[in-house]
Image (cartoon, rainbow, N blue to C red):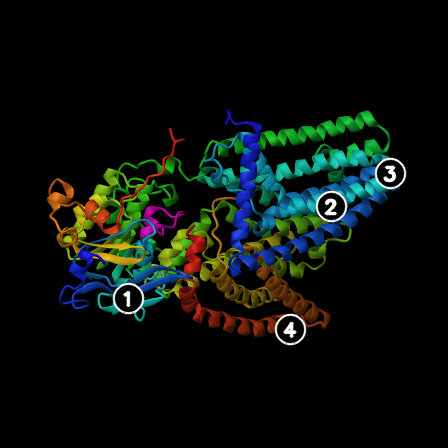
Amino acid sequence: MNAAGNATRNAPGALRDAAAIATENLTRRFGELVAVRDVNLRVAAGQFFGFLGPNGAGKSTTIKMLTGLLAPSSGRIEILRLDFARQPVDVKRQIGVVPEGLALFGRLTGAEYLTFVGRMYGLDRETTAKRTGELLEFMQLADQPKKLVTDYSHGMQKKLALAAAVIHGPKILFLDEPFEGVDAIAAGTLKAMLQRMITRGATIFLTSHVLEIVERLCSHVAIIHRGQLVAQGSLDELRAGVEAQAGTDAGELTGSGKLTLEEIFLHTVGGTRSAEPELSWLG
Amino acid sequence: MAGLTLAGQTGQLAAIAQVRWFIFTHSLRTTKGALELFSRIVIAVAITGGGLGGAILLGIAAWYFVSEGKPDGLALLLWPVFLFWQLFPVMASALTETMDSSDLVRFPLSYRAYVAVRLVYGALDPATVLGCLWLTGMTLGIGWAQPRLLPWAVVVLLVFAAVNMLLTQMVFAWVERWLAQRRTREIFAVLFFLAMVGLQLIGPMLSRYGDRSNATFHKVGQIASPVQAVLPPGIAARTLASGATGRNAAAVAFLAGLVLYAVGILRVLGVRLRAQYRGESLSEVSRDALPLKGRTGIRQGWDVPGLPGPVMAVIEKELRYLSRSGPMLLTFVTPIIMLVVFGIGGRAGNGGGFLQRWPELALPVGAGYALLLLSNLIYNNFGADGGGVQFFLASPASFRSVVVGKNLAHMGVLLAEVVVLGFGVSLLFRRPSALAMGTTVAGLLFAAPINLAVGNLLSLYSPKKIEFGTFGRQRASQMTVLASFVLQIAVFGVGGLTIFAARYYGRPWLAVVVFLGLAAVALAGYVFVLGRVDRLALGRREVLMEELCR
């Protein structure tokens, strides 16, 4: 753990008191490979939390464990102070998930899919129908009522998956790469909904490779690298940590002013490559 | 790709074969993969056994017709081979594996190479393997009877095999196209319904005209004979007959006719293949997908008093899925087609067919066949859900309620099918007696829970992603296919034995009692498995996601 990580990891008041999401030594092994090792996450209620890491760092494995899609090899997960291993159904009732593969049912229409999801979360038929209509309208999916989900564009599928994740009014929303492959218009719709949820007190946990969006949306960030949590805290805390580790201020590090999240990220995971091989055959 | 050399195209085909080989060898790294291989070997041995047995019988029959100077009789052998070749892939789609063209079209593969790959995949179909073995048997039989006819037999039966192989692929490709979109699906359904009604009228008409039926069949035979003679099996037989009697010019002309069939079928198939090659998507995009002016109200989900919301939601989802899957709908009407075939076939024969002799068994046999076809779904419950299985795992609804919903939906389909079969039996044979209905219901109460229990287990232990909208894709893993075969043999063996024993001892109602006793045991087994589904699903969630979220 580098300086940025240390600054927040040793923060007083620790863990579960106000944490919406807390993990303790969360570990997942796949045979010999340790995909996630001893991760201790703390996400306070109401935070917009970004979970970052290079490809293969363990982001998706972690989010799968946090949402019950994957069993941890060891360690604990508490969601809203509920032990996930002991009370999985109670936890699932209070969270919404947009997993990596979106988990859609392609041969239903958007309305049928949302109706199905609402009922699976225990909503009554009237409420489900009302919310389905509102969500389709909000996500601008209402004008093609007979179109099957399989025929939706990627952006439309993302919007539908998000609509399904929030139909039951979850307290925590887990999003795995919600902005991947989404155009600017659809991204704007998604962001508007997420901001609205945050102002109403929900907690959002998202993974993304689009660091500009994370920087703009998230108040707090954690960085995972090779399965280990290497930094966690508010953006200012992470910035201060990087500067402290470098023994200088941002102006000297960047030549401009404030460190961007991308610069923090690259500094934390060591993103520069030495001795780039020459691909002489490439146009 | 115009610029690609022949060597380049060969390299592409080699690369495709190599990728398939890598996928196969990598699959052996897991226990499931090894079991799959074992299942494939067992199924291959069974198919080879059937193929060799059939080849010997057909070889002897061909030898008899040629050596007795009755080569026209070869048509009697070629027609069953032809019908089997075309019908088996529909009846046993679990064994049929066709290529998903979307995997290939993103590569710079030439159209010819694409067609070659599709045709090679078609040749790996069990129906093709069996058909080829049987034709080989016939070729040897003909050569044995008349050695100088052997080269003719080789050429003619090779072309005949090509016609069969191409025709199967053509029918699949076009039916898939027609069933993919709502409008063509509806037209197809109406045509099918009219054909069914037409066929069902034959039964009552023949009953009405009674003794005159033989004369009628004689007339029908007179009309059918020249018709069959210009169809591929008839032409193949005439080519061989001409060759056997030294009428070489006629033989060449008939062979040219057969080749024309092959070319024609290839051209019609080519229309579909070219569309697929260009990247066609058989989606539901149609006028329904066009934006509507103004909002339409959102309908509430289905509701049945007493059933929990999640269970009802799953039932609704399953039935909507099935109703949008042309191939599945076609599978469900197959028992009715078979009933019609057996009904009419029975009437056509001199002494009547199996069901004609024992019409009491028509309903139980039809219902058993319907359950057998439904096992395609039951044994791979989550296959069509694909990535959606993640939702089941992440939602607060118990996996048990998901499984119960699916099981109830499938049983609803079975029940509807049995009712339709009941009407079919009434039209084709006679109204099922109370005993026949009792035997059917009791038999299903025994067979269905066993199939559901084993199906639920196999769905968790050996899932396989399937695409509901496509026709003829492999519907379950080989392990599932093998396990279901074994179970069906056991269940139908017990069922058949019970009915036979009860009838033998003159107490047919005893079968109902035995079935009800067995049903109690089967139901207990089903409940036992259901009680463990949540725990099993939790333990198998990684396998489920790995297999279904590809």
- The picture places residue A224, in percent across and down from the top left corner, at 27, 55
Q: Position of residue B411 (x, y in %)?
A: 49, 60
Please name the residue that numbered disc 4 is placed on. B510
Can residue B436 be seen here? The reply is no
- What stretch of residues is rendered in magenta? A100-114
Q: Return the disc, 2 or 3, that comes first in the chain's sequence.
A: 2
Circle 3 marks a residue in which chain? B
Q: Is residue A112 magenta?
A: yes
Q: Can marks 2 and 3 be said to lie on one chain?
A: yes
Label 1: which residue? A25
Q: Which residue is mark 2?
A: B134
Horizontal arrangement in the rendering, residue B227 relative to residue B465 (left or right): right
SS of the residue at dot 2? helix
In the image, A210: left or right of A14?
A: right
> Which residue was labeled with disc 3?
B146
* x 16%, y 51%: residue: A246
Q: In the orientation shown, which residue stands out farthest toward the right?
A: B68
